[in-house]
Image: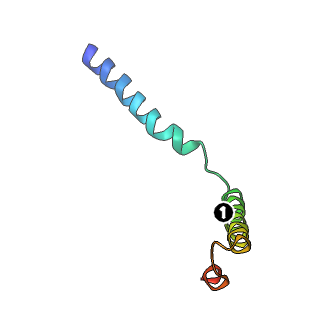
Amino acid sequence: MLFWVIAAILTLGASLAVLLPMAGGTKSASAAGDHDLEVYRDQLSELDRDMARGLIQPGEAEE
């Protein structure tokens, strides 16, 4: 009898460990897309700054 109680508790714990993260939901796609767009714009501004400082040639910035 004790074996079955312990087995049931372990099964319940394992099930919760798997199901709770799945029930939590995910980030919205627009939030992830907004972050990606912000990173892209930051990279473009870094290219412009590097080109203005003469670290890269204008042709290299276009690649």
Q: How is the image coloured?
A: rainbow
**Mark 1 sits on what residue?**
36
Residue in the picture at 46% in, 33% down? 16
Q: Is residue 60 above or below residue 13?
A: below
Answer with left or right where residue 9 lies relative to residue 50.
left
Res 1 visible: no
Q: Residue 15 occupies which quadrant of the picture?
A: top left
Q: Position of residue 35 (x, y in %)?
A: 69, 58
Q: Is residue 45 above or below residue 7?
A: below
Q: Is residue 15 above or below residue 6?
A: below
Q: Secondary structure at mark 1?
A: helix
How packed is label 1: few (under 14 Cα within 10 Å), some, or many (20 or more)?
few
Q: Position of residue 10 (x, y in %)?
A: 35, 26
Q: Residue 30 occupies which quadrant of the picture?
A: bottom right
Answer with left or right where residue 4 lies relative to residue 9.
left
Using the image as rendered, state which of residue 53 and residue 14 is in the foreground. Answer: 53
- From the image, which quarter does the C terminus lie in? bottom right
Residue in the picture at 60% in, 81% down? 60
Answer with left or right where residue 63 lies relative to residue 51.
left
Q: Position of residue 17 (x, y in %)?
A: 45, 34
Say what amino acid the circle numbered 1 marks.
Asp
